[in-house]
Image: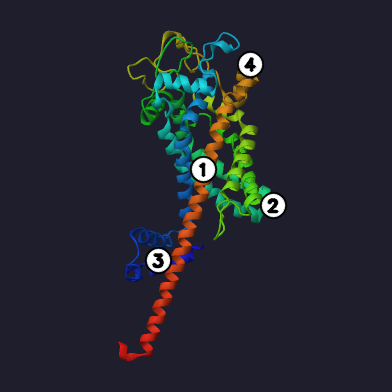
């Protein structure tokens, strides 16, 4: 639908209100409500539809999969919080597997522990999917004209959309990761998270005051490396959807079934392929996001000015994260390459796939929830607009016929 349609339909809808009321005086309240939604939907500009559907899809996905995201984050982050004097021993791990981690979180923190970080997750998904799907929808048309290659156009569009949404929302995801990785109970089990945040605002305040603005962009580089994920997922999704249903992303037949099974299968296959191929970057991103940039000073609220308080032993040392014994040291993770080397040396290559089982169990339902919600809302809004335009066209035709009859018979005036 073009924007001309929307601008033309506004005065029509406003001028036909009495006709709508009279024409449906005998209809049920539900039918009248649906009819009004159909009429009002014709006034929605097309460039509002994709962001709305994308944001709604992200919120639905976040609510459904938050507990699994908490479990995955704790599995990814635990290696960065362990005391070590050599290679990380398996027996020293606090969290083991999806079920074991879920049980420990439930035992220590209850249902609230499984929904740590839900606020920033929802706050992050709103702009993430709204920006991503909008930019993807617009840029793929541009790249199709410039590259004249179906696969390249969608890969470039995926990377462009992913870069835009990542840069905009990275601070929110850092806060979410910090909240999900912390523990409520403190004990001497060798697992020491050097912060405690009450909520998202408290986390943002403490991070800024102790670590500065750069803390909100921790892990940005591996997050941008993760654009390879969407560069694989969305072209594959659109390819599989067209193979199974005959329609591209956001497209549906005007009449008949939308082939929801085909959409689900396309989402499943594309997400599994992309997640398996690009998972290590998520571990790198989590480790960098959960590492403090500066040592916090001792205070009741664990807050101090940026850089902490000078101690006699600090002079001559570069600023870095606090170790588990309270002594300042160099940051364990500095940059993507050094982080890879450190993880490989201390924990082995298996650490790059820590939590991948949980990630797949979380990521696949999340992707399916996101895409099914997005596709359903696009189909629903398109259907409402189509029905609203058809009904307004019928009303206009009735008015024209009525005017012709009145002009043909002046005595009826």
Query: Badges 3 and 2: C-beta atoms under 8 Å apart?
Result: no
Considering only vertical position in the picture, is 52 above or below 165?
below
Task: Say which of 104 and 236 sits in front.
Answer: 104
Alpha carbons under labels 3 and 2: distance apart? 38 Å
Q: Secondary structure at mark 2?
A: loop
**Sequence-earlier tag: 2 or 4:** 2
**Sequence-earlier tag: 1 or 2:** 2
Q: Specify the quadrant that holds the C terminus.
A: bottom left
Q: Position of residue 16 (x, y in %)?
A: 36, 70
Task: Say which of 55 and 166 sits in front.
Answer: 55
Q: Position of residue 125 (x, y in %)?
A: 47, 40
**Sequence-earlier tag: 4 or 1:** 4
Considering only vertical position in the picture, is 72 above or below 93?
below
Q: Is residue 275 left or right of residue 313?
A: right
Q: Position of residue 233 (x, y in %)?
A: 61, 41
Query: From the viewer's perspective, is the residue at label 3 or at label 2 nearer?
Result: 3
Q: Secondary structure at mark 3?
A: helix
Q: Is residue 293 visible?
A: no
Alpha carbons under labels 1 and 3: distance apart? 31 Å
Alpha carbons under labels 2 and 4: distance apart? 42 Å
Residue at image mark 2? 149
Residue at image mark 4? 345
Query: From the viewer's perspective, is the residue at label 1 or at label 2 nearer?
Result: 1
**Sequence-earlier tag: 4 or 3:** 3
Using the image, tell me which numbered label, if any, was put on residue 370: 1
Residue at image mark 3? 10
Query: From the viewer's perspective, is the residue at label 4 or at label 1 nearer?
Result: 1
Q: Position of residue 388 (x, y in %)?
A: 44, 64
Q: Is residue 310 left or right of residue 264?
A: left
**Sequence-earlier tag: 1 or 3:** 3
Alpha carbons under labels 4 and 3: distance apart? 65 Å
């Amino acid at each position: 639908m073009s924007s001309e349609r929307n601008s033309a339909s506004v005065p029509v809808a406003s001028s036909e209100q009495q006709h709508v009321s009279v024409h449906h005086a005998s209809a049920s309240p539900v039918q009248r409500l649906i009819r009004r939604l159909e009429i009002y939907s014709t006034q929605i500009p097309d460039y509002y539809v994709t962001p709305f559907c994308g944001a709604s899809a992200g919120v639905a996905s976040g609510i459904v999969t938050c507990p699994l995201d908490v479990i995955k984050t704790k599995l990814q982050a635990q290696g960065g919080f362990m005391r070590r004097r050599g290679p990380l021993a398996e027996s020293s791990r606090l969290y083991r597997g999806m079920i074991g981690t879920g049980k420990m979180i439930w035992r220590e923190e209850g249902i609230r522990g499984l929904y740590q970080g839900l606020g920033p997750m929802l706050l992050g998904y709103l702009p993430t999917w709204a920006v991503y799907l909008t930019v993807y929808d617009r840029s793929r048309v541009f790249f199709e004209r410039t590259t004249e290659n179906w696969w390249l156009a969608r890969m470039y569009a995926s990377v462009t959309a992913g870069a835009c949404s990542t840069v905009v929302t990275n601070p929110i995801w850092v806060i979410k990761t910090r909240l999900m990785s912390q523990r409520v109970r403190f004990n001497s089990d060798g697992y020491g998270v050097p912060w405690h945040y009450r909520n998202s605002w408290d986390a943002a305040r403490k991070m800024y005051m102790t670590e500065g603005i750069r803390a909100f962009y921790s892990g940005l580089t591996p997050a941008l490396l993760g654009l390879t994920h969407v560069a694989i997922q969305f072209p594959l999704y659109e390819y599989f959807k067209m193979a199974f249903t005959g329609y591209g992303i956001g497209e549906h037949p005007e009449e008949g079934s939308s082939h929801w099974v085909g959409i689900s299968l396309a989402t499943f296959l594309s997400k599994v392929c992309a997640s398996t191929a690009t998972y290590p970057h998520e571990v790198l991103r989590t480790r960098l996001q959960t590492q403090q940039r500066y040592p916090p000073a001792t205070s009741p609220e664990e807050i101090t000015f940026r850089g902490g308080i000078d101690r006699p032993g600090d002079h001559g040392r570069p600023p870095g994260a606090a170790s588990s014994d309270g002594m300042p040291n160099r940051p364990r993770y500095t940059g993507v390459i050094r982080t890879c080397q450190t993880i490989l040396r201390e924990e082995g290559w298996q650490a790059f796939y820590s939590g991948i089982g949980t990630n797949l169990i979380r990521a696949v339902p999340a992707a399916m929830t996101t895409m099914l919600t997005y596709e359903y809302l696009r189909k629903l809004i398109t259907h409402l607009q189509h029905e609203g335009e058809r009904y307004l066209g019928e009303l206009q035709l009735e008015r024209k016929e009525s005017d012709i009859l009145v002009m043909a018979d002046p005595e009826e005036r």
